[in-house]
Amino acid sequence: MSPVLDTGMLHELYERKGAFPIDEDLLGRINPSTLGAETLQFLGMLVLWKQPKHIFEFGSGLSTLFLSRLQQRLGTTTPFPIMSIDHSQRYLGETRRALGGSSDVHLVHAPLAVTECAGRVFTTYHPAYTREIPHDIRFDLVLIDGPPAYRYGREAPLYHLAPYLTQDALIVLDDANREPEQEALANWQRTWPEGFAMVQFPDLKKGLAVLRIGEPARAVPAAVPGAQVTTDLDRVITFLKTEGGVFADGR
């Protein structure tokens, strides 16, 4: 049986998030494109509760620095405690400089690509980043805060990462109030109908969802039955013209 999502505890952590301290220099780094202060506080409470051994992050930056400091303060000593990917070499460079000499974060460049997965085409991270994951590592906390808000941009990453998750992994989706993220949540529920459980916190900036899929090792189907699909060819064409995207088959 899949682990049950403790919704009562999640709501309690949310109500108590104001007690979580954030370093002054981190507060100074907050801007419209980063996680907000309350979101960071709630994320901190989740980490304190979950005590994750391995964290995976889509989209590097302020949250990477926050998670790295928190894991260090908690005394996490497991190998490969944090892996963070980003589509931008510039953002990765900024994150690397902010981390200083920290060796607990594995940063990987994952360019955006038009990728086929689960019977549909997504504009998302090229899945080659999964080759960087050690064969014996399974992640128990995932933060999805990227890629940028192209249509379906944040749905495909979970399909790619699912085989590398523990059964009770917590998945945190930022900007969950937006239409593409709501579609992603609905399609994930169709993909993992037996193990899916979710709590949404719409008041956190543009919304946040915390969920479990329960059976991550089960293969993603060739097509998700009844999936919500929004045709948006213009977005893909614009991406190819302006961002230099590449085509990938998702393998």
Image (cartoon, rainbow, N blue to C red):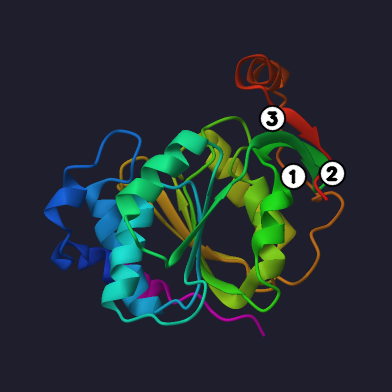
Total marks shown come to 3
**What residue do we see at 84% from left, 49% from top?**
223
Give the alpha-carbon distance from disc 3 to disc 2, as whole Å. Answer: 14 Å
Badge 1 crowding class, 10 Å Cα cut-off, few under 14, some 14 to 19, many 20 or more, is some
Q: Which mark is residue 227?
A: 1
- Indicate whether residue 8 is drawn in magenta: yes
* SS of the residue under disc 1: loop
Residues under numbered marks 1 and 2 in contact, where contact means CB atoms less than 8 Å apart: yes
Give the alpha-carbon distance from disc 1 to disc 2, as whole Å. Answer: 10 Å
- Disc 3 or 2, which lies upstream in sequence? 2
Q: Which residue is mark 3?
A: 230
Tell me which segment is drawn in magenta. 1-11
* x and y, in percent, of residue 119 in the image: 84, 44
- Disc 1 or 2, which lies upstream in sequence? 2
- Mark 3 vs mark 2: in front: 2
* SS of the residue under disc 3: loop
* SS of the residue under disc 2: loop
Residues under numbered marks 1 and 3 in contact, where contact means CB atoms less than 8 Å apart: no
Q: Is residue 175 visible?
A: no
Q: Which residue is mark 2?
A: 119
- Mark 1 vs mark 2: in front: 2
Say what amino acid the circle numbered 1 marks. Answer: Ala
Say what amino acid the circle numbered 2 marks. Answer: Gly
- Indicate whether residue 17 is drawn in magenta: no
Task: Name the foreground residue: 27 vs 104.
Answer: 104
In the displayed structure image, the side of residue 225 where residue 65 appears, left or right: left
Say what amino acid the circle numbered 3 marks. Answer: Thr
Task: Determine whether 33 is above or below 110 in the image.
Answer: above
Q: Residue furthest bottom?
A: 1
